[in-house]
Amino acid sequence: DGEVYDSFDYPIADRDKIDAMRAEFDKVVDKIVSTIDPGDSEYEKELAIHDYLTENVSYDKSLIRLDSEARYPKLGCRIYGALVDKKTICTGYTHAFQYLCYQVGINSGRVYGERHVWNSVKIDGEWYQVDVTWDDPFDENGNDGCQNHRYFNLTTSRMNESHPACTDTFYEIFVVPDCTATENAYKGAEVGRLDDEDAEAVGSIVAGIFIFIFVVVGKTNEKRKAKCDRQ
């Protein structure tokens, strides 16, 4: 029926706890959606969702230290962790963005890369790619506060420069539209798309965990320097 549900890491017998969590989740979603004007354009609604997540959710670095079997049952990896606990990793950011878009009538999907996931989104009839996780980095001291729009509504080719979609046959079940439009790229004062001289994406393995480190170097303002550890 198009509705998105998230699984909770609790025994099914604990029905009261699950119901209470679902009620809290729905309350948070309703509050977020209530701040978005129904009369806004699709671009404005999408931007509001993106900015809510980058401003209110933090990347949970503790989860990336766990192996996959221990990590992914955790609520922090899911939409509940993102919207209720406000700490998550890329899966939670992506599911939350998609779910909130659905709530305001915007079509959104998921794009899977090598140990990372982000979103596709359909705005004014055209598809774009957006990576909320990489738009919510933490600085070299592990602090939040360097949110940006560098990965907001990019074309497929532009996103592929830093982290392309996975070509493994397992992911063929996830249809990723070819995103070529640029009309709804970020319209703010900052540069919304990544300049080659501004940043580089580096893949590394640390203690058996694959982590993407994205280093943003501002040309005109050294205070904007940020190192972003990501899956």
Image: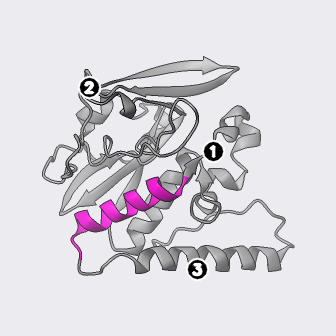
Q: Disc 3 marks which residue?
A: 27
- Whole-percent x and y of residue 45? 30, 68
How far, Cα to Cα, is label 3 from label 1? 23 Å
Instruction: Residue 35: name its quadrant.
Output: bottom left
Determine whether, in the image, residue 98 is placed left or right of residue 65: left
- Whole-percent x and y of residue 106? 32, 67
How far, Cα to Cα, is label 2 from label 3? 42 Å
Badge number at residue 219 = 2
Q: Main secondary structure of the magenta part?
A: helix
Mark 1, Cα crowd under 10 Å, few <14 / some 14-19 / many 20+, is some
- Vertical arrangement, residue 91 with respect to residue 34, above or below: above
Is residue 226 magenta-colored? no
Q: Look at the numbered disc 3 and give the secondary structure of its residue.
A: helix
- Vertical arrangement, residue 82 with respect to residue 160, above or below: below
Q: Amino acid at mark 2?
A: Lys
Q: Residue at x 34, y 47 (%)?
A: 130
Let me know if residue 200 appears in the view: yes
Between 135 and 181, the one nearer to me in the picture: 135
Q: Look at the image and give the residue range highlighted in magenta.
A: 40-57
Residues marked 1 and 2 touching at CB (< 8 Å): no
- Whole-percent x and y of residue 121? 31, 56
Q: Amino acid at mark 1?
A: Asp
Q: Residue at x 71, y 42 (%)?
A: 71
Q: Disc 1 marks which residue?
A: 60
Determine whether, in the image, residue 51 is placed left or right of residue 99: left
The numbered mark, 1 or 2, whose residue comes first in the sequence reads 1
Instruction: Residue 10: name its quadrant.
Output: bottom right
Q: Look at the numbered disc 2 and give the secondary structure of its residue.
A: loop
